[in-house]
Image (cartoon, grey):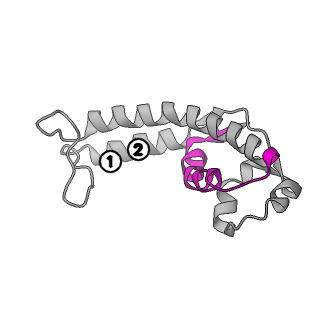
Amino acid sequence: MKLSNEVLVSSVSVLGKLNQLELPVKVAFILSKNIKEVDKSLGSYNETRKKLLVQYAEKDEQGMPKADEMGNIIFKEGCHEKWTEDIRELLELKVNLKIEPISTHDLFKAEISISPAELEKIEFMIKD
């Protein structure tokens, strides 16, 4: 299955929430496998994102990207637009993952509470 990094990044919070719940064995097993697959792919995404931060951000005394008092990265003069372009390109890149779908039937049996917005973020791993 080909998915964009943006889809994977947006699914992380929901997958983390589901990973903490008591689920039927089948759903828990498939979810666990899918989370490992997403995490593996996001490792490459995060590595590239960090390299871009190092490239475009101002550095502190330890050579780490500087942040303001609100935690926002401080970019080198003239670099914010390039950062935005590069991060957008990175988010749009598609990656191949081995995602095993979870049936809606099995998900309904799990009797979990999940919002429509959360469900939308993981719809790539749900089948009818």
Label 1 CA crowd tier, 10 Å (few <14, some 14–19, many 20+):
few
**Magenta stretch holds residue 37:** no
- What residue is pinned by disc 1? 81
Viewer-proximal residue among 40 and 93:
40
Q: Secondary structure at mark 1?
A: helix
Magenta region, residue range: 2-26
Side (left or right) of 51 relative to 28: left
Side (left or right) of 95 relative to 82: right
Q: Quadrant of residue 83?
A: top left
The structure residue drawn at horizontal position 70% and vertical position 55%, both measured from the top left corner, is 22
Looking at the rendered structure, the kind of residue marked 2 is: Glu
Q: Secondary structure at mark 2?
A: helix
Viewer-proximal residue among 101 and 29:
29
- Residue 36, given in percent of the width and then of the height, sits at 62, 35
- Residue 32, given in percent of the width and then of the height, sits at 68, 41
- What residue is pinned by disc 2? 85
**Vertical arrangement, residue 50 with respect to residue 80, above or below:** above
